[in-house]
Amino acid sequence: MFSDASARVRESLYGVWGRTTIGDKVYHTPSSGFMIAPGVIMTNAHSVHLDGDVTKPVNKELDVIRSPDIGKQAEATTLITEDIERDLALLRVKNPRSTRCVTLENRVLPSGTLCGSLGFPLPKVLSTPTGPQIVLVERFQGAFISAYVVDNLTGKPLPWYEVDKQIYGGGSGCPGFLENGNVVGIMSRVRDPESESDIPAAKRHHLEISCWIPSTEAIAFARRSGVL
C-alpha cells in the first residue's frame, strides 16, 4: 500500500549525524531528516544539539547521508536556522549529490487518516580502526492520525498531530506521509503524560502515541526562513 510512496520519499530521506568532541570523548546525536528544497534538509531542532538537548550547544559537526547513498561518504552541512519552540531546524548541504525534494502537504488532515513514516530509528554507532561508524537501517512504520491538538509541549501552545505509533531513538525528524508520498508531518516526541509523575517507570502505561509537527507548520517555518 505504501511501497510506492516509500520509494519516492526515500529519494529525499537523510540520516543526520551530529557529533561533538569534548576532550577524548565523542558524543553522537543520530536522527533523521528530509530535503525540502535543493540543498536544504529539515529535521528537528533538538536533533542538532548535543545529546538531543536544546539547552546544550549545537553539535560541532552535522553530517548527512541520503538513504540511497548509504555506504558512501557523508555530506557536511551547516545550520541555517532553528525554531526551538516549534522543534524544527534547517540544514544546508553546500554541493548536494541529489536535489530530490519531498512535497509538503499544505492542509490539516482529519483524524483517522492513514499515513506512514520512513527514517532511521534504532541507529548504532560502532567503533572501528578508522573511527566511529554509524549504522543506519531504513525503517517504515504505518500509523493513523489520532487527533490534531494544540498543546504546550515545548513551552508555547502549538498545533500537533497525535499519531498512534511510538517513536524510537533516532526516529526524530522522520517524515510522515500519505499514500501519494506527500509529507504531512515530522516526528518530534512521544506523548507521555506520566513521564514526570511519581509513578515508577516500570509501572507506567506504555503509550504508543507520538507527536508530529504538522506539515503546515513546517511550510510556515521554511517560508519565514526564506527557503520556500
Image (cartoon, rainbow, N blue to C red):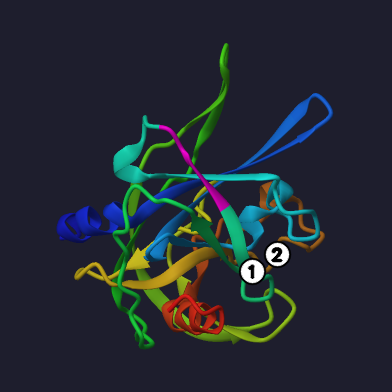
Residue on which the image places disc 2 = 194
The structure residue drawn at horizontal position 29% and vertical position 42%, both measured from the top left corner, is: 68
Q: Position of residue 192 (x, y in %)?
A: 63, 64
* Disc marking residue 82: 1
In terms of secondary structure, what is the magenta stretch mainly?
A: strand
Q: Position of residue 182 (x, y in %)?
A: 28, 72
The structure residue drawn at horizontal position 29% and vertical position 52%, both measured from the top left corner, is: 10
The quadrant in which the C terminus is found is bottom left
In the image: residue 11, left or right of residue 222: left
- Mark 2 burial class by Cα count in 10 Å: few <14, some 14-19, many 20+: some
Q: In this picture, is 216 found above or below 213? A: below
As drawn, the residue found furthest toward the front would be 95
Give the camera-side residue of 176 and 131.
131
The quadrant in which the N terminus is found is bottom left
Residue type pointed to by label 1: Glu
* Disc marking residue 51: none
